[in-house]
Image: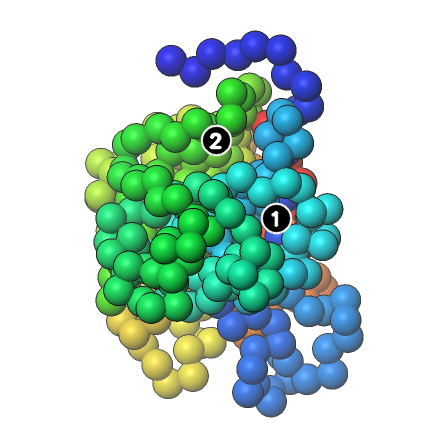
Amino acid sequence: MFTLGVVSLMPTVTLLGIAQDGGRPQPGCQRACCADLGPEDVQHPVSLGIVDEHGEGHLIEATRALGEQLRRWGHPTMRSVLLTHAHFGHVDGLGLFGRETLNASGLRLYVSPSMELLIERTPQWSLLLEQGVFSVQPISSGTVHPLSGHVRVEPIAVPHRAELSDMHAFVVRGPNRSLLFLPDHDRWKDTLDHHGAATIREWLAQLGVDVALVDGTFWNSDELSGRSQLEVPHPPVAETLERLGPRTEDDPDIIFIHLNHTNPLYNETSAQHQAVLEMGWKVGQQGMTFTL
């Protein structure tokens, strides 16, 4: 049972990045979406920072922008790292916790068994285990993991390309509010079927969340530049909006994250961005903070 005591600080969650794995601008992109971007336009790969009631930090995803994300986050004392899956932008900063950079020690690393196996088989990552940088804490869907006395996380298995590992979203629960972190999944139908829900609203109600940070990689399939959604499966924002319709009073806040560099939602004056707002939903902003 989740027991509350005296809370020193209200736990908070900070959105440390909103971009898809390649970031914005994306390396090699010479199109208008990445040309002439100023420093204020740079967006880091998606990551979430949790600060518990003791002021200690717990990071979901380890991106290559780790240094800048920690700086913007205020460098809390780190206690744990959680990984959703093995795709590039979510794990390529893992080595930065090692002796060459942060020289961390004894961080709890929450990963699924398939992700743990990948780490053990990858020499530069397995070395982090041997040197005591990380202590693996296995996760599975439906389990509950206390990060502190007042913050817990619940892994939620969702279907997503599993070339290297499976995929788990996370529900983060605090004393007063709960948040879903779902940066990637393949298709709404697959995810909803997997959890026995007929609609997005029904599933979010089952999870009991107040805020849902959801996969908004592409506005629609026109951004795929000749590739098919079978190759890069993500539910388009346009489909998510069609499934949801306008926000009602009882709905959680739904916020789109993990935006590909081509996504028109980056442009706050675009028709697509305005359509999201007019329906009562939101587009993620780097640095957004939520109190739990």
Quadrant assignment for the C terminus: top right
Q: Amino acid at mark 1?
A: Leu
Residue depicted at 42% across the width and 78% down the height = 224
Q: Is residue 162 left or right of residue 105?
A: left
Q: Residues within 10 Å of mark 2 (few under 14, many from 20)?
A: many
Q: Is residue 2 left or right of residue 164?
A: right
Q: Position of residue 127 (x, y in %)?
A: 38, 61
Instruction: Report helix, strand or loop for mark 2.
Output: loop
Q: Amino acid at mark 2?
A: Leu
Residue depicted at 27% across the width and 71% down the height = 230
- Colour scheme in use: rainbow
> Residue 251, relative to residue 277: is it above or below?
above
> What residue does disc 1 label?
15
Q: Position of residue 195 (x, y in %)?
A: 25, 38
Q: Nearer the viewer, residue 190 or 243?
A: 190
Q: Nearer the viewer, residue 47 or 79?
A: 79
Q: Position of residue 191 (x, y in %)?
A: 28, 47
Q: Quadrant of residue 117?
A: bottom left
> Residue 231, relative to residue 142: is it above or below?
below
How much space separates mark 2 and mark 1, taking CA atoms?
A: 18 Å
The residue mark sitting in front, 2 or 1, is 2
- What is the tally of numbered marks visible in this picture? 2
> Residue 32, relative to residue 22: is it above or below?
below
Q: Residues within 10 Å of mark 1 (few under 14, many from 20)?
A: many
Instruction: Report helix, strand or loop for mark 1.
Output: strand
> What residue does disc 2 label?
147
Q: Position of residue 277 (x, y in %)?
A: 63, 49
Residue 232, visible in the rendered structure: yes
Q: Nearer the viewer, residue 30 or 125?
A: 125
Q: Is residue 282 left or right of residue 238?
A: right
**Nearer the N terminus, badge 2 or badge 1?**
1
